[in-house]
Image (cartoon, grey):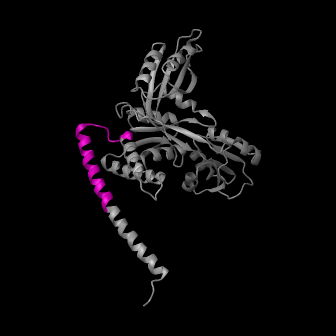
Amino acid sequence: MTQPTQSDALAALRVQIDALDAQLLTLLNQRARVAEQVGALKRVEGTPFFRPDRVAQVIEKITSTNPGPLQNQHVVSIWREIMSACLALEAPQRVAVLGPQGTFCEQAAIEFFGSAANLIYCANFDEVFHATAAGTAQFGVVGMENSTEGVVARSLDLFLRSPVHVVGEVSLLVRHNLLRQLNALDGIEVVLAHPQALAQCQNWLSQHLPRAERRAVSSNAEGARLATTHPAWAALASERAAAQFGLHIVAHAIQDEAYNRTRFAVICLPQTLAMPPPSGKDCTSLLVSVPNRPGAVHDLLVPLKKYGVSMTRFESRPAKSGQWEYYFYIDIAGHPAQPQVAAALQELRSLCAFYQVLGAYPVSE
């Protein structure tokens, strides 16, 4: 009797995989049909189609019961895409991001909404805010803070003039790569990137390309696009941008700090999506100003200490009134629905000449 060969065993396993794929496809389409029914009910009730807290609940439940061998991080990616595809059947979500294609902002949006979202590419963060406030997009994604270079000042300033609020965040590990038409470092005359990316790679650029001009552009992906137009130009951008524009990655991960992260905020109008309920690990963002008197800024911190609320960020920005007045952007740990946070905020508000809650949302891992 002939013994089964290794190729026979492999063929049998592939038959099993094909059968399982067919079952998965059937089940996914069953899920999609139920999602369509959910969408119809939401349309009648007028409730939001996209609920990030519901997405988080589903993913938490799935990962807590995952028997393996799939790792939880891969399960999260799979389920986010499944839910994104089903949501697209209910109502495709329009999301404004910094363009062109290939930006880290685009990557952050896909991580939050899934790849089925309808992305609207904007030339700058001003346009992202405007598109979201005007209703062209239901949501927007904007850079808020980098672990190396600090806050994105323009985003903070735009909150002061916009009716949008923050409903989520994405913390993205950012690796800058040197992209070029030619697969060589020789002959690079100009390096193009967003100003923050140039700052995050300044040591590497000074060491390896000391004579090259550093030219700031609206986004890293725009730099990559421009690099396709001149053989002596290079860009700092993502691997996604390299694939998008057909460029060589001349040098990988050249940022000065290995653990270089950028925090992106997900914004929308309050009528699009209200403040998410507490998740147990939340951040509340505030925009305040105080009367110009001695000790006023110190007094802002007293209610937080009194009620045991931790402050995780404190930034000042000029009010641009010509009177040397400032607004303060404050992040605190917790949610306004929690009693100690609510008490601290109530007392803090009484001290402010201007007070606005920019949002309360789950902290990105």
Q: Residue 93, can we see it?
A: no
**Which residue appears farthest toward the bottom when viewing the image?**
1
Viewer-side residue, 104 vs 26: 26
Viewer-side residue, 241 vs 80: 80
Percent x, y for residue 301?
54, 18
Magenta segment range? 26-53
Percent x, y for residue 361?
44, 33
Tell whether 174 sits left or right of 45.
right
Residue 65 vertical position relative to residue 146 in the rendered view, above or below: below
Viewer-side residue, 247 vs 226: 247
- Is residue 62 part of the magenta span, yes or no? no
The quadrant where residue 150 appears: top right
- Is residue 45 part of the magenta span, yes or no? yes
Q: Residue 52, can we see it?
A: yes
Q: Residue at x 57, y 15 (%)?
A: 298
Tell whether 232 sits left or right of 11.
right
The mark total stands at: 0
